[in-house]
Image: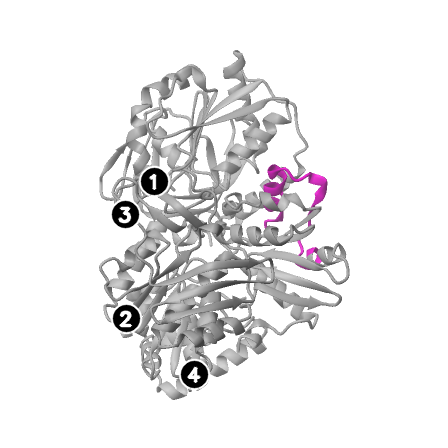
Amino acid sequence: MRIRVGHLYPDYLNIYADRGNIAVLADRARRRGHQLDVTAIGLGDAVRPGDFDLFYVGGGQDREQELVAHDLAGKSEALRSAAGDGAAFLAVCGGYQLLGRSYRDVAGVELPGIGLLPVQTVAGTTRMIGDVLLACPWAGRTLAGFENHAGRTLLDAGAEPLGRVLAGFGNDGVSGLEGCRYRRAYGTYLHGPLLPRNPWFADRVLADAIAHRAGGEPEELEPLADELELAAHEVSAARARARGGGRS
Amino acid sequence: MVERRERPASTAESGYGCVMRPPLALDLETAAFRAAGALSRLARRGGGTTIPGKLLWKLDPGAIDALARRLPRGSALVSATNGKTTTTAMVAEILRPSVAVLHNASGANLVSGVASSLLARRDAELGLFEVDEGALPEVAQRLDPRALLLANLFRDQLDRYGELEIVAARWRRAVADLPRASLVVNGDDPQVAELASGVETARIFGIDDPAHARPALQHAADSKYCLRCGTPYDYPAAYVGHLGDYRCPKCGHSRPPLDVVGSEIELLGLDGAAFTLSAPEGACRVELSLPGLYNVYNAVGAASLALELGASVSDVGAGLGRFSPAFGRFERIEVGERRVLILLIKNPAGANEIVRTLVDAEPPRVAVIALNDEIADGRDVSWIWDVDFEPLLTGLETLVATGGRAEELALRFAYAGLRRDRIEVLGSLEAALDRGLALTPPGGELAVLPTYTAMLALRRLVASRGYVANYWEAAA
């Protein structure tokens, strides 16, 4: 099966090794007999909701994020409609913020988001930097990564987080929540990149994209030998326990 | 452990007002601090390169300024994301025959390291310091340098330095605070060249040799968008990362005219490089024993600063010709019947150039790559995914992955397409080195690519086997 991925603004939003996430998705799809077709969606490119099974949005520096925010706002209707039709979204860091309703910087200037995720973000004066470990009770698994953000992201009442913080800062450093999950859209501050050391989550995103393509509900993918991935997960999780959330 | 990367204290903590005890007389103090350095080395805490400086800084921060003012020919500072250790060592080599140069050769490049260097040698005429990008404003303010070389800004250790724009803003402040210092900047880096905008006396250097340009900007290129209007730059020639000849197609913002140029470049595999240096003072052919285009940049930058400090073109050519690599940067160490080639990697732009230089010469069959995640390496290891390691795959039969994050590195290569049975994960650096050497035939050379703390550990390891002097001895 061809899984069609729309990679939003790869030239601008690529700061925390986002291509690592794409490489992992492509390789894990290939080993299940599928093919990942990745199309870059840039400034001024039109998006048709049915064209993609998965949208990927990475993180950028403030300057780059500003350059794309207004363009993205013009695509908001198409992207929201794609999400409503069950397309999968993975948005990391700045991309996560942009999928929310808005981002207010330290000077009080508000950048528009696309309102796909029920969150809003306000920049703080200090950055939250370090290793993170999350529990994801909805999947019965953990996620390990690295965070580096000044934004404090607040979930609307009733919104689902991606996970609960076991170690690290998370969305805002106080709520104990990290990321946001809405239908098949996932937003998170975890990079590092996220997917190589969290293979179950890579497979979950792939399964969601396949479900969009094939119709029906996501199905478990056939397991792969993930010894290296799990060993990397363990080291990353141990780092978070030892030094996440500004512990050292 | 050399704590090269400790954060500079805020200026609020460095005034006399916060010092609890009165400052000691300077001479008594310096003797005590030199003793502290020796003690720290004896105590095997590491090189001891920053311990005395830290003590001095804590007890009497103003003493650093006083020590610097004693230098009869003042000081010059070098900062950059990549190449500052090599560039500074090159300038020192150029000047060495004619000036007694004090130089923080062991790479201790925060305020405390500069202070320790000032304490270590009292007969120097000129201070020459590489300075951490983030520490530049404070070091510049304390030393009041007569010249400042600013060479490049790449994304590096975002967990520590923050975004590129934040470092650039600090540099702008440092430059604004030093109206009397001669400014030497790399015109091929848009952010850095901009620092000299409106500074008539600035000396601007760069490279002009389209034959060595890359076909396109690399994946992780920074500063791709026009500083003035945000449009992507056109690059008639991109040489290293985003360094090159750039022009904005919309507003016309472009590389400024160059005063000092490296051209007619020859890259001689792993053996060296040669280029023609042209400056207002004259021109010469330079033969470097260091390979790679990035070292041509280092050499042209070093030449520019040396000329600014009064060296002649022939001093520059001779000094660069004599120069041998700074520790851990393209350093070759004989280990029994084999050689170890140490290539420090620390960020995508620098690592890309290492990979390109290795592969252009001859793709290695075996490589040991050591990824640590201490503060000095960057705790965030995501940068390895922005490095274009893929060209190494052409000849690689075995990758030995080591260091605290060996598994992460192994995954990087596995997802790049290296078969998993060709990847060996060995957490211990010593085991990894021995494995790499065992896979290297007698007379052969083993490429080892360590991050900063792994590089120090590796040198300690080969030193403990008696193959090389410890770096603080080598640098002395």
Image position, residue B211 (x, y; %) = 48, 51
Verify whether residue A170 appears in magenta: no
Which residue position is annotated with label 2? B181
Residue at (42, 87) in percent of width and height: B123
Mark 1 or mark 3: name the one nearer the start of the chain: 1
Residue type marked 2 = Ala
Inter-mark Cα distance, 1 to 3: 11 Å
Would you place residue B218 above or below residue A4 in this image?
Answer: below
Question: Label for residue B253?
Answer: 3
Image position, residue B471 (x, y; %) = 57, 72
Mark 2 or mark 3: name the one nearer the start of the chain: 2
Do tags 2 and 1 sit on the same chain?
Answer: yes
Verify whether residue B416 appears in magenta: yes
Instruction: Give the camera-side residue of B280 and B174.
Output: B280
Left or right, B362 with respect to B101, comes to: right
Mark 3 or mark 4: name the one nearer the start of the chain: 4
Labelled pair 2, 1 in contact (Cβ < 8 Å): no
The kind of secondary structure the magenta stretch mainly shows is: helix
Which residue position is annotated with label 4? B98
Give the residues drawn in magenta, as a range.
Answer: B405-432
Locate residue B25: give its quadrant: bottom left
